């Protein structure tokens, strides 16, 4: 899976599950937590989606805002994690 | 602003007098009820509300309602009775466990817990906890912590489904209590007193249609530190004043900061006050023994909770305005 593919999947998931429409703007560098797009229940759904779709398992220490606060950050974090796990 | 640790100190006698006048005006004139029902939990907020109502309306015109269930601490009922006795208030105890059992609440609760710990059963106890945002910029990802019959503690991250179902079952308990509050209020022609303090009210630490539902909320403007100040001035029993605030909702003892707030209430109060008055984090930090970065995180958490719990404060929303009613509401509440 490439970083662009992860970004596209996350983008689609967030739009479908948290925005409920096609019109609301959603930028890949937008703060998801700060803008309220993803709330405390949403973050649980997002984590489950990422673990299942990208076949990763997050450590508690990885569940920090810096890794999940935008679609770009999520994609970069997932790619870094996948490459670490390959090694 | 000269921010200091005693900045929330108020004049208890003046505050009590103002709240008493407010209660009398609200209950007797605006709501046109003869007294008040207060669900007394054994905690500080309901104790102070009950005492204020008793002082304002006369103890004989305030009903203290105790509604324990399977997961309640026995201390809650004992302390509630101690308070009602001291204030000269009639009281009523309704064990809500049979209602919760019959409605499936405990079954749903057990099912949710077993989504996380499949072997959960007799002799186990549990609570929901959040990671400390003081230690890092952690996401608010809830965990289920359980104690096995042999005393071993286990903690697992919750799925969204388990979390939502467990919270729904927990909220059911609060809504059942509220149904009983209103039954007693209807029967006696009383108003229902809500007991949130400012921290709970502002941060959405209540259940819509549960403990959030009331006819009046006399201490919603007071920081918890101030509620403790009033408690002492009102003569609330020391054992209630000294008790660590708990949720008294799950079978394992749980502090409010484990479940919802980032910090113990005294520090949380000061952060909320600081944030509300635009005090820089760097000025608040040394007063409460945190770093400016930690206070910034608390400020952000305050904003997030305020935003995500906003729907709890909203009334049922209409598609089109019914002006006759909205104008009447404006006339009463502004």
Image: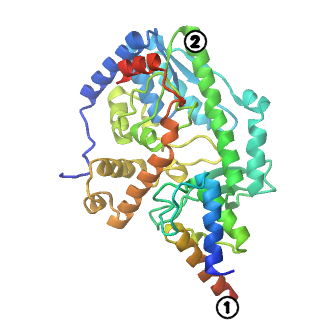
Residue sitting nearer the eye, B167 or B307:
B307
Q: Position of residue B6 (x, y in %)?
A: 25, 46
**Is A84 placed left or right of B316 in the picture?**
right
Residue at coordinates 44% horizontally, 9% vertically from top-left? B32
Residue at coordinates 69% horizontally, 61% vertically from top-left? B154
At label 1, counting other C-alpha atoms closer than 10 Å, the crowd grade (few under 14, some 14-19, many 20 or more) is: few
**Is B138 placed left or right of B175 in the picture?**
left
Pointer 1 residue: A87
Q: Position of residue B200 (x, y in %)?
A: 45, 40
For residue B186, the mark is: 2
Q: Is residue B263 visible?
A: no
Which chain does the numbered disc 1 sit on?
Answer: A
Residue at coordinates 63% horizontally, 67% vertically from top-left? A10
Against A63, residue B270 (above or below) is above
Foreground tag (2 vs 1): 1
Q: Secondary structure at mark 2?
A: helix
Say how many tags the image has: 2
């Amino acid at each position: 899976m490439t970083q662009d593919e992860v970004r596209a999947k996350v983008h689609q998931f967030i739009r479908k599950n948290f925005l409920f429409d096609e019109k609301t703007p959603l930028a890949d560098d937008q703060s998801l937590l700060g803008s309220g797009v993803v709330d405390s229940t949403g973050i649980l759904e997002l984590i489950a989606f990422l673990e299942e779709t990208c076949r990763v398992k997050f450590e508690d220490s990885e569940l920090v805002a810096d890794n999940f606060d935008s679609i770009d950050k999520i994609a970069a974090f997932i790619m870094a994690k996948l490459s670490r796990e390959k090694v | 602003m000269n921010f200091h640790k005693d900045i929330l100190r108020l004049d208890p006698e003046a505050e009590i007098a103002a709240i008493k006048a407010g209660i009398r005006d609200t209950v007797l004139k605006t709501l046109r009820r003869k007294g008040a029902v207060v669900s007394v939990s054994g905690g500080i907020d309901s104790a102070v509300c009950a005492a204020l109502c008793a002082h304002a309306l006369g103890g004989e015109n305030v009903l203290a309602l105790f509604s324990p269930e399977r997961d309640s601490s026995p201390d809650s009922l004992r302390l509630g009775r101690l308070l009602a006795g001291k204030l000269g208030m009639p009281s009523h105890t309704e064990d809500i466990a049979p209602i919760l059992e019959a409605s499936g609440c405990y079954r749903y609760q057990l099912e949710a817990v077993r989504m996380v710990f499949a072997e959960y059963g007799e002799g186990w106890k549990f609570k929901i906890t959040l990671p400390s945002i003081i230690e890092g910029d952690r996401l608010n990802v809830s965990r289920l912590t359980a104690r096995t019959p042999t005393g071993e503690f286990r903690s697992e991250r919750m799925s969204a489904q388990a979390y939502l179902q467990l919270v729904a079952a927990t909220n059911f308990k609060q809504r059942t209590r509220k149904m009983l509050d209103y039954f007693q209020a209807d029967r006696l022609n009383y108003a229902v007193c809500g007991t949130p303090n400012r921290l709970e009210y502002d941060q959405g630490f209540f259940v819509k249609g549960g403990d959030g539902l009331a006819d009046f909320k006399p201490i919603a403007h007071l920081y918890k530190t101030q509620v403790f100040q009033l408690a002492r001035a009102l003569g609330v029993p020391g054992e209630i004043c000294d008790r660590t605030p708990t949720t008294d909702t799950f079978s394992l003892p749980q502090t409010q900061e484990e479940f919802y707030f980032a910090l113990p209430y005294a520090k949380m109060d000061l952060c909320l006050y600081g944030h509300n008055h635009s005090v820089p984090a760097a000025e608040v930090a040394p007063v409460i023994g945190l770093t400016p970065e930690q206070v910034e995180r608390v400020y952000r958490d305050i904003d997030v909770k305020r935003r995500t719990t906003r729907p709890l404060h909203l009334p049922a929303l209409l598609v089109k305005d019914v002006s006759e009613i909205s104008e009447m509401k404006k006339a009463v509440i502004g």
